[in-house]
Image: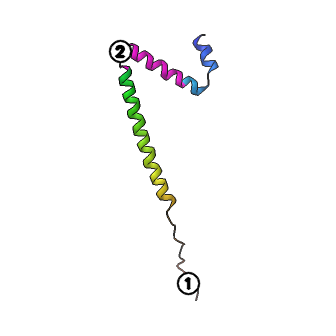
Amino acid sequence: MSFKEAVREMSRDERFKATVSAMNTLLIQKGVYTQEEFEAYFCQWAEAKTRRHHATQGVFRRIKNWVIPARVSSFHST
């Protein structure tokens, strides 16, 4: 299969995944980094993303539980 055929056959998401996979394989084979270094950075990114997600969820829960007071009119009928 040629590169152009592969690109035509895959969805955008599949092309992105194939690109990341090919780049990581090449960088490991060229000795730019090891598989262990890649996995360590991968896990570090995932942990940071998970912490941000959990922190954001806590904020949304607190906002959801806020009580908005009824608006008090400055004009009173007499």
Please state which of residues 42 and 74 is positioned toward the viewer in this rendering: 42
| Image: 9 above or below 73 | above
- Write down the residue under mark 1: 76
Where residue 70 sits in the image (x, y, percent)?
A: 54, 72
Residue at 62% x, 25% y: name it.
Answer: 11
Q: Which residue is at the far bottom?
A: 78
**What colouring style does the render use?**
rainbow
| Image: 57 above or below 65 | above
Give the amino acid type for the residue marked by disc 2 in the picture. Answer: Gly
Q: Which residue is at the far top?
A: 1
Tally of numbered tags? 2
Mark 1 and mark 2 in contact? Answer it, CB < 8 Å: no
Q: Give the mark toward the camera: 1 or 2.
A: 2
Give the quadrant of the C terminus: bottom right
Considering the numbered disc 2 on the image, is that residue within a helix, a strand or a loop?
A: loop
Please state which of residues 11 and 71 is positioned toward the viewer in this rendering: 11
Residue at 36% x, 23% y: name it.
Answer: 36
Give the amino acid type for the residue marked by disc 1 in the picture. Answer: His
Is residue 20 covered in magenta? yes
Most common SS among magenta residues: helix
Q: Which residues are magenta?
A: 16-34
Residue 31 is tagged as: 2
Residue at 43% x, 15% y: name it.
Answer: 26
